[in-house]
Amino acid sequence: MTPLFNSDIEACLRVLESGGLILYPTDTIWGIGCDATNEAAVTKIFDLKKRPDSKALIVLIADERSLLQYVASPHIEVFDYIMGVSKPTTIIYDDAIGLASNLLAEDGSVGIRICTDEFCKHLIKRFRKPIVSTSANLSGFPPPTVFSDIDIAVTQGVDYVVNYRQDDLTPASPSAVVKCSKDGRFTILRP
């Protein structure tokens, strides 16, 4: 870990703990993040993105064990499914628990991704809570594939912009999205 990595982690922790917003690299695209248990912080994301608050947001966690804290009775098959995918995959679960209610879908479901990116994983483990991850774009515009594509309204609308990986020009894409039903069936919503 570089000094830049560590200073970014420390700055992000201060912002997240105070209910603020961060702009950070994930295992997919750059994301706008906040404490996924803080309703006021989640509202700030909807306001910044000019996005209807009826749309659910994705949550990042650091490991499978954390899933048991935020989903009531996930189907056991989901753990095998997660082990078998190579692309970052967000799974939609029924019956979310312990998360800000305004980030959930109307039916109480939530999209959760176990993050593999070193920066995100480290940040989440240090924060000890899940972090929201929504694409770093204004509603209706395409998600940025590299940092330089992010709209200035987003970079100026957050409380902290991570410096780590800003110079990475490898185009990124959003995660796959899969719905896991209560009976253990999987439906691919976005390959």
Image: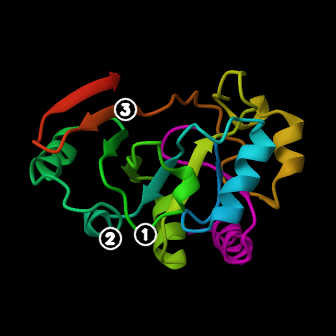
Q: Position of residue 82 (x, y in %)?
A: 21, 46
Quadrant of image for the N terminus: bottom right
Question: Mark 1 and mark 2 in contact (Cβ < 8 Å)?
Answer: yes
Question: Mark 1 and mark 3 in contact (Cβ < 8 Å)?
Answer: no
Q: Say which quarter of the image contains residue 13.
A: bottom right
Q: Say which quarter of the image contains residue 68.
A: bottom left
> N-terminal of the two: label 3 or label 2?
2
Query: Does the rendering let one see residue 163?
Result: no
Alpha carbons under labels 3 and 2: distance apart: 21 Å
Quadrant of image for the C terminus: top left
Span colored in magenta: 1-29
**Residue at the (65%, 39%) spot, across then down:** 168
Residue indicated by mark 2: 69
Q: Nearer the viewer, mark 3 or mark 2?
A: 2
**Residue at the (68%, 35%) spot, across then down:** 52
Residue type beneath disc 1 = Gly
Q: Is residue 87 left or right of residue 104?
A: left
Residue 177 badge: 3
Q: Is residue 162 left or right of residue 126?
A: right
Q: Position of residue 93 (x, y in %)?
A: 30, 47
- Please tell me whether mark 3 sits on a helix, a strand or a loop: strand
Alpha carbons under labels 3 and 1: distance apart: 22 Å
Residue type beneath disc 2 = Gln
**Residue at the (16%, 45%) spot, across then down:** 182
Is 3 contained in the magenta span?
Answer: yes
- Please tell me whether mark 1 sits on a helix, a strand or a loop: loop
Residue type beneath disc 3 = Val
Query: Does the rendering let one see residue 167?
Result: yes
Residue indicated by mark 1: 98
Q: Is residue 21 left or right of residue 56?
A: right
